[in-house]
Image (spheres, rainbow, N blue to C red):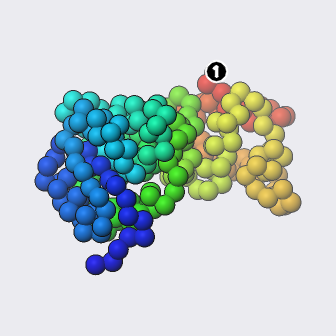
């Protein structure tokens, strides 16, 4: 069997013994040192004692929310460099936003596809821990995960073209500021690109159409003679 490049100590935290044992067996077969916990209390004791390289933690634990355990880890100076991967079978896209904004390094939905999971564990171990507490830019019910480059509206993932994604991110990072077309072109396109006078307007309309079902299109305001502004004050 092919060995992973990075052999590591891994703690699996999941109250589902069957699922946990399956994953543990696969990881041990690759040469990793794997320990298991079925609840947050025992997991917290284990991470403080052994400080594993990676904790794979389920969102739903019998004694504590998995994200609360993640938060405790990220607030502990001795544990901040430990990687944390969250899992969940709840099918709620808002779980991704909460987990990543709380400092998770990755998020895997159940049922787990073992080859993909192994690859993501490998990738997680190769990069530094996400010690930044937040990778999410948000306003009202709009959230942007800047690492995964995913956009959520009221917890539901929405699809944006690359230009609209960059534009929305720029707006949320400059709330209440009037942004001219020239500023938007400079940020979203190459500075030297030549665009028609209404190109920005077209992308604004597309962005508004995505936000319209939730009523958030009202936050993307036209400032006549100047440009556009994203503001929660309407």
Within 10 Å of disc 1 (Cα), the crowding (few <14, some 14-19, many 20+) is few
Image quarter where the C terminus lies is: top right
The kind of secondary structure element at disc 1 is: loop
Q: Is residue 170 left or right of residue 87?
A: right
Look at mark 1 in the image and give the residue it sits on. 233
Q: Measured from the top left, where is residue 105 in percent x and y?
A: 45, 48
**Residue 193 place in picture, x, y as percent:** 83, 61
- At 34% across and 34% down in the image, what residue appears? 69
Q: Nearer the viewer, residue 182 or 172?
A: 172
Using the image, determine if residue 18 lies above or below residue 211.
below
Task: Establish if 96 lies above or below 224.
Answer: below
Q: Can see residue 31?
A: yes
Q: Quadrant of residue 114?
A: bottom left
Q: Tell me, yes or no, if residue 66 can be seen here.
A: no
Asked which quadrant contains residue 70, the reply is top left
Which residue is located at x 71 percent, y 27 percent? 176
- Tell me which corner region of the image, top left, top right, bottom left or bottom right, holds residue 220: top right
Q: Which residue of the protein is positioned furthest toward the bottom in this rendering?
A: 1
């Amino acid at each position: 069997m092919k060995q992973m490049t990075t052999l590591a100590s891994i703690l699996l935290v999941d109250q589902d013994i069957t699922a946990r044992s399956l994953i543990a067996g696969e990881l041990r077969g690759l040469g990793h040192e794997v320990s298991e916990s079925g609840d947050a209390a025992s997991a917290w004791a284990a991470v403080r004692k052994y400080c594993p390289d990676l904790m794979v933690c389920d969102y739903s634990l019998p004694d504590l929310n998995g994200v609360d355990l993640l938060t405790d880890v990220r607030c502990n100076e001795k544990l901040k460099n430990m990687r944390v991967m969250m899992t969940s079978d709840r099918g709620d896209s808002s779980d991704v936003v909460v987990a990543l904004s709380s400092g998770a390094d990755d998020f895997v939905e159940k049922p787990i596809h073992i080859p993909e999971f192994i690859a993501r564990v490998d990738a997680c171990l190769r990069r530094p821990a996400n010690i930044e507490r937040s990778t999410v830019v948000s306003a009202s019910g709009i959230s942007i995960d800047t690492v995964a480059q995913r956009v959520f509206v009221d917890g539901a993932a929405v699809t944006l073209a690359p230009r609209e994604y960059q534009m929305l991110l720029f707006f949320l990072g400059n709330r209440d500021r009037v942004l001219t077309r020239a500023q938007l072109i400079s940020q979203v396109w190459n500075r030297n690109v030549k665009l028609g006078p209404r190109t920005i307007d077209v992308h604004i309309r597309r962005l508004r159409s995505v936000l319209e079902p939730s009523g958030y299109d009202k936050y993307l305001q036209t400032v006549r003679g100047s440009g556009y502004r994203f503001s929660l004050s309407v």
